[in-house]
Amino acid sequence: MILPILLVVGVLGSIFGGIATPTEAAAVGAFGAIISAAIYRRLNWAAFKEAAYGGIRTTAMVMWIIGGAAAFSAVYTGLGATDLIRNTIEGLTVNPWLIIVAMQASLIVLGMFLDPNGMMLITLPIYIPIVTALSPALGFTPDEIVVWFGVLFVMNMEMGYLTPPFGWNLFYLKGVAPADITIQDIYRSIIPFVLLQLAGLIIVLIFPNIALYLPNLIMG
């Protein structure tokens, strides 16, 4: 029992301690799992081959998803959707806060279909100049509003990892879940987590100082 606990502590501890990135911590976890299997005398060629094949299948599935998302992003941009979004937002004569809310709503929708890289390539060149121009009306300095909007953007991307039909974590779970667990079961199971993330997004949207307190403290 102590070995699994040590494995979790090693993985999470290396991340929170700033020793390793999440990717590097995954390697720590894999190495620790091999050591644990050897100690429990379960490390054999059959188990190692099964784990390797499972990892290859999941990686191949995710790479196909990434390829499809990249193609969709390229077509989306090539058809002029980026210009359409920019012109629509710039043409709005409404309260600046409603523009920020509309941006967050659009990111939530895009997160259902695009990967984070695609979202950044499509939206950030449009949204950042707009939110910077809105900073005086919203009571922020340009630096503050970029930090605040950046936090909101990251929270949106994290929500996008869980929102169907395209959510990386959903396919990760399907790749490692038992065969009798369907993708519909996974879709239903993530509803509470998406709602929690949405609640967090709304709280940071309403109370920007949650995101700005530490940066302002550091900058004096």
Image (cartoon, rainbow, N blue to C red):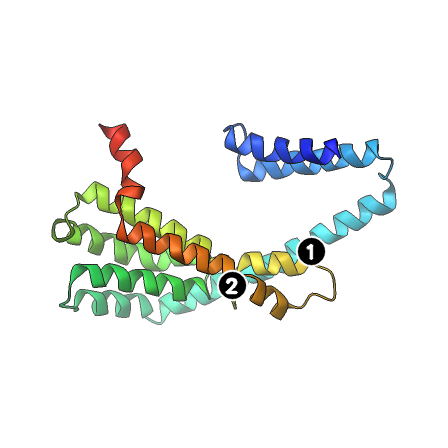
- Return the x and y of residue 136 as percentages of the image width and height: 12, 49
The image quarter in which residue 215 lies: top left
Q: Is residue 143 left or right of residue 119?
A: left
Query: In terms of secondary structure, where does tag 1 sit?
Result: helix
Q: Give the residue at mark 2.
A: 191
Quadrant (top left, top right, bottom left, bottom right) of the C terminus = top left
Relative to 53, does residue 166 appear above or below in the rendering?
A: below
Left or right of 5, for residue 34? right
| Vertical position of residue 27 compared to residue 117: above or below | above
Residue 176's disc number: 1
Can you see residue 13?
yes
Question: In the image, what residue occupies the spot 46% across and 65% down?
Answer: 112
State whether residue 117 appears in this view: no
- As measured in the structure, the alpha-carbon distance from the residue carrying label 2 to the one carrying label 1 is 19 Å
Q: How far across and how far down the image is residue 170, in percent? A: 58, 60
Q: Residue at x 66, y 37 (%)?
A: 29
Ranked by sequence position, the earlier of labels 2 and 1 is 1
- Position in image of residue 54 (x %, y %): 73, 53
Q: Amino acid at mark 2?
A: Ile
Residue at (13, 68) in percent of width and height: 93
